[in-house]
Image (tube, rainbow, N blue to C red):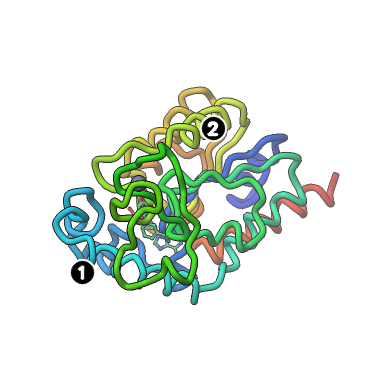
């Protein structure tokens, strides 16, 4: 009898796979998720640290909060799950990662095609968006405990991440939709499926008949539409899935 892992491997053995990830992907690297009971929002109010209003009220506090998160992220390492996602590129012709994470751990693990829907803690931008999408790369000088002025207009700089009430970066969103439409299967890892519009990509995919496999240790909104749910963490289940896919190829 086919095991759940083997069935998942069959479904994902396609020319073009999308891997859609959320905060749970990086939990095994020691980075907290947002919405779980022990998550970031159990300690900090999202409206204070992740909204344009919060930044206007207290730019210094928000800047420092992100500096601290960035330091945690730089001290963290990609886990076995990120590495297995990167290794999928050795087995399948085209793999695109669409992530809600802002930590850059997929790229550090070696994934080559990564779309960051919610930006990155590793970049800053002008809080007035004076140059459209102008992005400032962090430098030792920018990494001060005070937000520095934008070199173009003098407004404060801020992390290049998407806050509550803000639009997703439009080119990244369009690219993500293109990938979802063009792929044959989606592997969802470590997302609660509650953050829109990101989560709707998974429903688009399913509505268009793409195969759907989910890895998550807890129930999610996506469980009901996934064809196979692998209940476990990213660091244990993703390598197991990779091994099942490799075994499938070896048997061919
Ligand atoms: P979420 O906090 O809403 O949900 C996290 C999900 O991860 C839950 O379903 C939980 O069951 C699952 N999970 C917990 N431990 C796991 C593990 N070890 N392996 C696999 N799954 C596990 O997160 P979300 O759905 O990604 O929505 C979150 C928003 O949070 C995004 O906008 C993202 O930008 C932001 N965020 C990013 C990071 C990061 O970059 N590392 C961290 C926290 C939050
Ligand atoms: Zn500016």
Mark 2 vs ligand 1: CB below 8 Å = no
Whether residue 214 is visible, yes or no, is no
Mark 1 nearby-residue class (10 Å; few <14, some 14–19, many ≥20): few
Residue holding disc 1: 43
Which residue is rendered at x = 48% and y = 50% of the image? 21
- Asked whether 145 or 186 is in front, the reply is 145
Which residue is rendered at x = 32% and y = 44% of the image? 195
The numbered mark at residue 3 is: none
Q: Position of residue 217 (x, y in %)?
A: 42, 60
Q: Position of residue 210 (x, y in %)?
A: 56, 29
Q: Nearer the viewer, mark 1 or mark 2?
A: 2
Residue that protrudes farthest toward the left in the picture: 57
- Asked whether 91 or 227 is in front, the reply is 91
- Asked whether 165 or 205 is in front, the reply is 165
Whether residue 225 is visible, yes or no, is yes
Which residue is rendered at x = 60% and y = 35% of the image? 185
Q: Is residue 172 above or below residue 32?
A: above
Q: Is residue 252 above or below residue 101?
A: above
Q: Earlier in the sequence, mark 1 or mark 2?
A: 1
Mark 2 nearby-residue class (10 Å; few <14, some 14–19, many ≥20): some
The numbered mark at residue 175 is: 2
Residue 155 falls left or right of residue 1: left
Helix, strand or loop at disc 1?
loop
Q: Position of residue 250 (x, y in %)?
A: 84, 52
Location of the C terminus by quadrant is top right
Per the model, the C-alpha gap separating discs 1 and 2 is 34 Å
């Amino acid at each position: 009898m086919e095991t759940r892992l083997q069935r998942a491997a069959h479904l994902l053995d396609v020319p073009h796979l999308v891997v859609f990830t959320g905060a749970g992907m990086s939990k095994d690297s020691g980075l907290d998720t947002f919405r779980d009971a022990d998550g970031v929002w159990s300690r900090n109010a999202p409206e204070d640290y992740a909204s344009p209003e919060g930044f206007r009220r207290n730019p210094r506090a928000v800047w420092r909060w992100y500096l601290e998160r960035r330091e945690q992220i730089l001290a963290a390492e990609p886990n076995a799950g990120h590495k297995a996602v990167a290794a999928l590129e050795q087995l399948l012709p085209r793999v695109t990662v669409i992530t809600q994470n802002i930590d850059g751990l997929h790229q550090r693990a070696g994934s080559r095609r990564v779309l960051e829907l919610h930006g990155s803690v590793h970049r800053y931008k002008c809080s007035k968006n004076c140059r459209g999408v102008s992005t400032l790369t962090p430098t030792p000088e920018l990494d001060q405990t005070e937000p520095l002025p934008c070199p173009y207009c003098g407004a404060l700089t801020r992390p290049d991440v998407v806050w509550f009430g803000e639009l997703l970066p439009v080119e990244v969103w369009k690219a993500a939709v293109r990938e979802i439409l063009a792929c044959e299967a989606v592997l969802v890892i470590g997302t609660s499926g509650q953050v829109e519009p990101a989560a709707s990509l998974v429903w688009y995919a399913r509505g268009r008949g793409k195969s759907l496999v989910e890895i998550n240790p807890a129930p999610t909104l996506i469980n009901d539409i996934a064809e196979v749910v692998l209940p476990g963490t990213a660091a244990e289940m993703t390598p197991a899935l990779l091994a099942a896919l490799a075994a499938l190829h070896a048997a061919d």
